[in-house]
Amino acid sequence: MNDKKKRIIKGSIELFAHKGFHATSVQEIVDQANVAKGSFYNYFESKEDLIVSIYDYYYVTILERMKEAQKEQDPRQSLIKQFEIYFNFIIENKPLIVMLLRDQVPLGQNAESFIIQTRQQNFNWSKANILAIYGDSIKPFENDAAVLLEGMIHCYTSWIVVDEKTIDRRQLPKFLLNRLENVCQGMMNEEEHPAIQRLPNVFEQSALLLTKIRQLIHSAIQDPSKALEALDVIEQEVQKENPQKIIIESMLDHLKKFSALNDEVLTLEETLEREIL
């Protein structure tokens, strides 16, 4: 991520947490970041646009922290460690989270895509961990299990934000793993039909990969404009009834020029070959 953009994001986080979103001006943000006011509008259309970038910044940050936990050979211990990292992150950033809830921060024209992106990421993370633990046995119920895990995490997150002292956070990660075990073993043993029969299009693997690549572009590419343009073309093309293979392949080749995106772009290419090309 561009250094100036990162300074603006970090500076705004401090100000929003201390003063609130509506009470903080763009001038105060650029003063805190020690950049010219014009620099703000080079990267963000508005304060609402900045909020979406803050989310992306946090998401990439927490993914980086979780990488070590994901190296754990036992997938159950890995998930426990990821729970610990996540809930500690929530506590560290509680002032900003409370502010966002209290001030009812608007997301403007980005609201719908932001909500879809959040759902994609949470669902993908939940399902990946569930499959790592239970393997093929959980396949018929993987989507239901992921939704149930998301629900538990969301509820306990809300509880922590309201009053963290009422929860034993040291016990919570293991407690959640045990409840997941009850849920998954119950579904597998009872052999009932899954409630979720198919996923909406936004949860298809290609859609999840496009979202991940977009965040990587924002966080890892110094000048993201060309990469974002290529990604936008791919997104628009795959939504068409008859997508043009030559256009998609051309844009994928362009994205491959960015080494930070290479693994995800190759996976996207393979996925699109299966799904639509």
Image (cartoon, grey):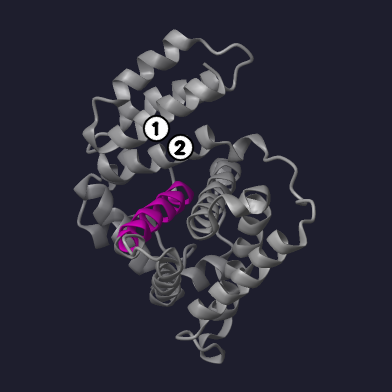
Q: What stretch is highlighted in magenta?
A: 47-67
What residue is rendered at 52% in x and 49% in y? 124
Q: In which quarter of the image is residue 176?
A: bottom right
- Residue that carries the numbered disc 1 in the rendered image: 267
Residue 169 image point, x, y percent: 48, 84
Residue 3 image point, x, y percent: 20, 49
Residue 110 drawn above or below residue 102: above
**Residue 111 in view in this figure:** yes
What residue is rendered at 31% in x and 63% in y? 65
Q: Is 203 included in the stretch rendered in magenta?
A: no
Residue 203 drawn above or below residue 76: above
- Mark carried by residue 209: 2
Q: Is 57 included in the stretch rendered in magenta?
A: yes
Q: Observer-nearest residue: 77 or 204?
A: 77
Residue 218 image point, x, y percent: 33, 42
Q: Which amino acid does label 2 sit on?
A: Leu
Q: What residue type is labelled 1?
A: Thr
